[in-house]
Image (cartoon, rainbow, N blue to C red):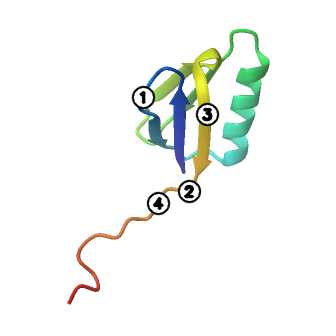
Amino acid sequence: MEIKIGVRSVHREIVLETDESVERIEEELRNALAADRGVFSITDVKGNRYIVPVAALGFVEIGEGENRSVGFGGTL
């Protein structure tokens, strides 16, 4: 699953792949938003952990990863 995290005052978004379910990600985000001075944290498929203070969150986009085709199919 692909996650995009927008951080306030940063021009690029954080894009990562995770094996966690949508429900688990939403639960983690709700808990972070409810906590005073909360942080949203998530681990990607490589084991890297991302921690973003909720005060800096601009958006979190949860979606399926895009299957990209490789090669020059259909150009013959």
Q: Is residue 18 left or right of residue 30?
A: left
Instruction: Give the residue at mark 1.
Output: 11
Label 1 crowd bin: few (<14), some (14–19), many (20+), radius 10 Å: few
Tag 4: amino acid: Glu
Label 4 crowd bin: few (<14), some (14–19), many (20+), radius 10 Å: few
Instruction: Give the residue at mark 3.
Output: 59
Tag 1: amino acid: His
Residue at horizontal 29%, vertical 86%?
Answer: 74
Label 3 crowd bin: few (<14), some (14–19), many (20+), radius 10 Å: few
Which callout, 2 or 3, points at the residue further toward the start of the chain?
A: 3
Q: Secondary structure at mark 4?
A: loop
Which callout, 3 or 1, points at the residue further toward the start of the chain?
A: 1
Which callout, 1 or 2, points at the residue further toward the start of the chain?
A: 1
Marks 2/3: CA distance? Answer: 17 Å
Q: Secondary structure at mark 3?
A: strand
Residue sticking out furthest to the left: 76
